[in-house]
Image (cartoon, grey):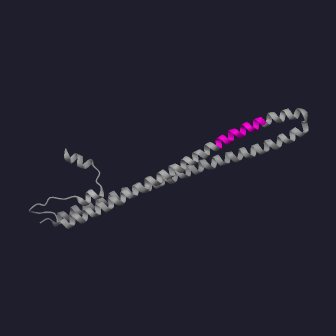
Amino acid sequence: MARTEEKTMLLSPLEIQQKQFRLKLFRGLDAKEVESFLQKVADQLSGLLKEIDELKQDLEERERQLGEHREREQTLKNTLISAQKTVEQMKVNAQKESKLLVSEAEVKAERILNNAHNRLAQIHEDIAELKRQRTQFELKLRATIETYQKMLDMQKEEEAEAEGLESKLKFFTKP
């Protein structure tokens, strides 16, 4: 039962450094070699934990930026709705004024509609740009995460190779 709990517990660098091994009368462990190995393991674990913290902070920052982009997108949508309502109101006003001054109202209505359409087109372009930026950000974030995953996988493979070589060395060094 105790062995199962040991395997599932994560070790801290300090626990690794402070680990004590029992010595046996025959074929005891080389204390310096064990301490050196434990120090290496603790150093690597400490580096990985630091890297994980940095990745978490980077992810939080990117999520914050994504939230800001979403807020901007919502603001632009609200502005678009407001612009559309404004255009509709301007149309109604233009029709009322056209009854009194037909020629003058037509000129004003065209100018207002052109401005509104230009603004609407600009808002659509802004929304498309924000969506493109969001997609680009997500792709970069995925690429970064995949790169780190590949680095971790490569490290696991290297560790497995090192363990294989170590077991072969132990086989050759046994009396």
Left or right, 128 with respect to 165, comes to: right
State yes or no: residue 111 in magenta: no
Residue at (77, 35) in percent of width and height: 89
Task: State the quadrant of the C terminus.
Answer: bottom left
Majority secondary structure of magenta residues: helix
Locate residue 153, reporting x and y percent.
36, 55
Left or right, 24 with respect to 107, comes to: left
Task: State the quadrant of the N terminus.
Answer: top left
Identify whether 6 is placed above or below 42.
above
Quadrant of res 150: bottom left
Identify whether 137 is placed above or below 81.
below
Residue at (82, 44) in percent of width and height: 111
Viewer-side residue, 175 vs 20: 20
Residue at (60, 47) in percent of width and height: 131
State yes or no: residue 88 in magenta: yes
Left or right, 41 with respect to 29, comes to: right
Residue at (80, 42) in percent of width and height: 112
Total marks placed = 0
Locate residue 116, reporting x and y percent.
76, 43
Locate residue 119, reporting x and y percent.
73, 46
Identify whether 135 is placed above or below 168.
above
What range is drawn magenta here? 76-89
Q: Residue furthest left?
A: 25
Quadrant of res 29: bottom left
Viewer-side residue, 154 vs 69: 69
